[in-house]
Image: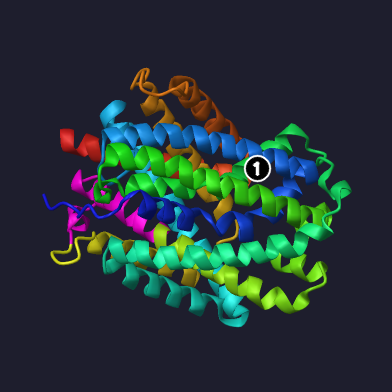
Amino acid sequence: MAELARRLGVPDAVVIGLGSMLGAGVFVVFAPAAAAAGGAGLLVALAVAGFIAFCNATSSARLAARYPESGGTYVYGRERLHPFAGFLAGWGFVIGKTASCAAMSLTIGAYLWPERARLVAVLAVVAVTAVNLRGVGRTATATRVLVGLVLAVLAVVAVTGAPHVEPARLAGFADTGVRGVLTAAGLLFFAFAGYARIATLGEEVREPDRTIPRAVPLALGVVLAIYLLLAVVALGVLGQPRLAASTAPLAEAVSAAGLPGLTWLVRAGATVAVTGVLLSLLAGVGRTTLAMARRRDLPSALAAVHPRYRVPHRAELAVAAVVIVVVSLADVRGAIGFSSCTVLVYYAIANASALTLGRDPARKLPVQLLAALGLVGCLLLAVNLPPASTLAGFGVLALGALWYALRHATRAT
């Protein structure tokens, strides 16, 4: 079986994690989360989502160090629980993240050319896939450039908006109370899920038992600090009602702070950020597809690795084709909630897998407790997402489970 080349060190892995996370939360999720939870509720929900993401990151890092191959929780579930658990995780990841790719592509179109958003979205998918097909080394290099540009733009937003933050606007909860906070946390989790990209690239990381446990918490910690700062700025400048109704909250915050001339810069930064997310997202989905194809949970033809660039070229092309179809024909509203639901189930399986590893004397953290809290937290957030997202997410997971059962029943006869 052809293997992928190990080229990534800690800095590359952290950069890919940052590129996968920065953008979705800052430019897409804050508005619906504020609508669900209220002002103070948004900040509480962000802390909840960040804590559950930390639990998941700890479990994912332990498992990825033990099983340093492409596939993430698809592999962990198979090895630690049952082949069906692995299949369900992989199915949920591929379906949910394919929806995320479509949402990110359309976001690029909406920022660059709203009147031709679908056309721009298709072109973005084609361009990003072309970069990924040239090899993960080029993916890491491109992502490093994108992350640097995005951080510069976000720094402009923070510096511009901070002097205009009104503390009174940071107070208040929505009428839905605790449920609203959990709904917002589930939506905000969409913004943290990118750190899994480090684990799904496990077969391409040097010294995975050292690199992955260091890279995942580092990437997550940096992103959480950035999200908290920008949430305070956006909420403190705009207020909860205006933030909840905004389609471009950071651009609007800069304008409200008295510098409307910088709005174009923020919109350009949003485009760059979402492109970075899409770059790493497509790479991660392609590698999970590769892992599933290797075990014939997906067509085995998708298991091919390019002889020169050492990337799963057929898997990446297939994923890109599906994303283009969704972008061209479907309405992707609600894609964030749908993706969050399936990915939360994915991480619930990761935490359940980590619980089977037992205690780790080499770690000071209570890793078993964190895995248990992550498992409960993921399920709690999944069932508190908007009802349409929950029903769609669990419905697609049920269809996958039915297909798995029928396929194995056919093989047994």
Report if residue 295 lies within the magenta region. Answer: yes
Tell me the magenta residue range.
281-305
Task: Residue 109: name its quadrant.
Answer: bottom right
355 sits to left or right of 76 = right
Amino acid at circle 1: Leu
Q: Which residue is more in the foreground, 361 or 80?
A: 361
Q: Which secondary structure lies at badge 1? A: helix
Residue at point 72%, 62% (across, down): 159
Residue closer to the observer: 406 or 205 = 205
Identify whether 370 is placed above or below 164: above
Q: Position of residue 38 (x, y in %)?
A: 79, 45
Could you say where residue 214 lies in the image, as x and y percent from the top left? Answer: 39, 40
Q: In which quarter of the view is residue 211 placed?
A: top left
Residue behind mark 1? 46
Which colour style is shown? Answer: rainbow
Q: Is residue 400 magenta?
A: no
Provide residue 6's location: percent of width, then percent of height: 22, 52
At 20% from the left and 65% from the top, the residue drawn is 309
Q: Is 267 located above or below residue 354 in the figure? A: below
Q: Residue at x 78, y 42 (%)?
A: 40
Q: Main secondary structure of the magenta part?
A: helix
Q: Is residue 318 left or right of residue 267?
A: left
Q: Quadrant of the C terminus?
A: top left
Q: Is residue 330 visible?
A: no
